[in-house]
Image: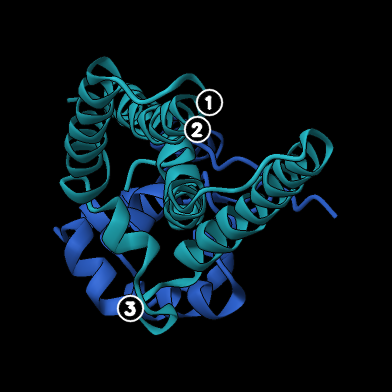
Chain colours: A blue, B cyan
Amino acid sequence: MESRKLYNRINLLRKERGMSRQELADKIGVNFQTIGYLEREEYNPSLDLAFRISEVFELPIDMIFSTAAFKSISEILKENSNNKHHE
Amino acid sequence: MNKSTSKTGSRIWIILTLLSLAGLAFIFEYSKTAGWTTAFTLIEIIFIAILLFSFVMGYVRTGLWAFGHRSLKQLDERELMVISHSLRTAYAIFTVLVLSFLLFVALTERSISMVCVVSFIIFAHLLPASIVGWDEVV
């Protein structure tokens, strides 16, 4: 069975927290190259690894991983701005 | 060095290593029937030099050899998948090659030299790491 592509926000969250790939890799117990594969969405993590990532970022799994592509920051900001104008 | 360049470089060293190993065995086998000459000795020395140099450049310096022979406990889940894929592919390639070679030996009623056997042993050890190096940047 071919697994679906998983989209994630690992790169964004890691940079937001000022973490290097090596630091994140050490925290979740993988090789730093695996972080690169995850960030490029070339590798789908196991449920265990996904939980470990969510624990490091202190966010629910569905805020980090999705089967649909995440909206970009500019799209989210634009939506928020439009919503405020409507209110 | 970007990802594609290092992958191309790695592939060139892998090809050189495997070809020099095959060449080494082939020349030895050929010289058994054609007669051993100084030219053959020289070619064998060149093949050994290429084999050693390309092995160091493509497998040792890149960490490919260490990665391919690392304990399973030291690998993360993605690396385990990479190793698993490489071992499965290596098994298929090695089996087909060795059985084809044995069939050829049986049909032509030749004898198998020690150099051939040693080359196959080296090849068996190189193959999984070669597949990893071919597909991935370690």
Quadrant of residue B10 within the rendered picture: top left
State whether discs 3 and 1 lie on one chain. no
10 Å crowding of disc 2: few (<14), some (14-19), many (20+): some
- Between residues A20 and B102, which one lies in front from this camera angle? B102
Residue A44: percent from left, percent from top:
58, 57
Whether residue B2 is visible here, answered yes or no, is no
Q: Which residue is mark 2?
A: B29
The residue lying furthest to the front in this view is B35
Q: Can marks 3 and 2 be said to lie on one chain?
A: no
In front here: A7 or B35? B35
Does residue B55 sit above or below A46 in this rendering?
above
Q: Dot 3 falls on which chain? A: A
Q: Position of residue B56 (x, y in %)?
A: 18, 43
Question: Foreground: A41 or B102?
Answer: B102
- Residue named by callout 3: A29
Rendered residue at 75%/53% (across/down): A3
- At x 51%, y 72%, the residue is A50
Q: Which residue in the protein does label 1 denote?
A: B33
Q: Amino acid at mark 1?
A: Thr
Residue placed most toward the observer, B135 or B78: B135
Nearest to viewer (mark 3 / mark 1): 1
The amino acid sitting under disc 2 is Glu
Q: Quadrant of residue B50?
A: top left
Q: CA distance from mark 1 to mark 2?
A: 7 Å
Residue count near mark 1 (Cα–Cα under 10 Å), binned few <14, some 14–19, many ≥20? few
Q: Position of residue A60 (x, y in %)?
A: 51, 74
Q: Using the rendered image of the protein, determine whether residue B28 is visible from the camera's viewpoint.
A: yes
- Kindly state the secondary structure of the residue where label 3 is placed: loop
Q: Residues at badges 1 and 2 in contact (C-beta under 8 Å)?
A: yes
Contact between labelled residues 2 and 3, with CB atoms less than 8 Å apart: no
Residue type at mark 3: give it. Gly
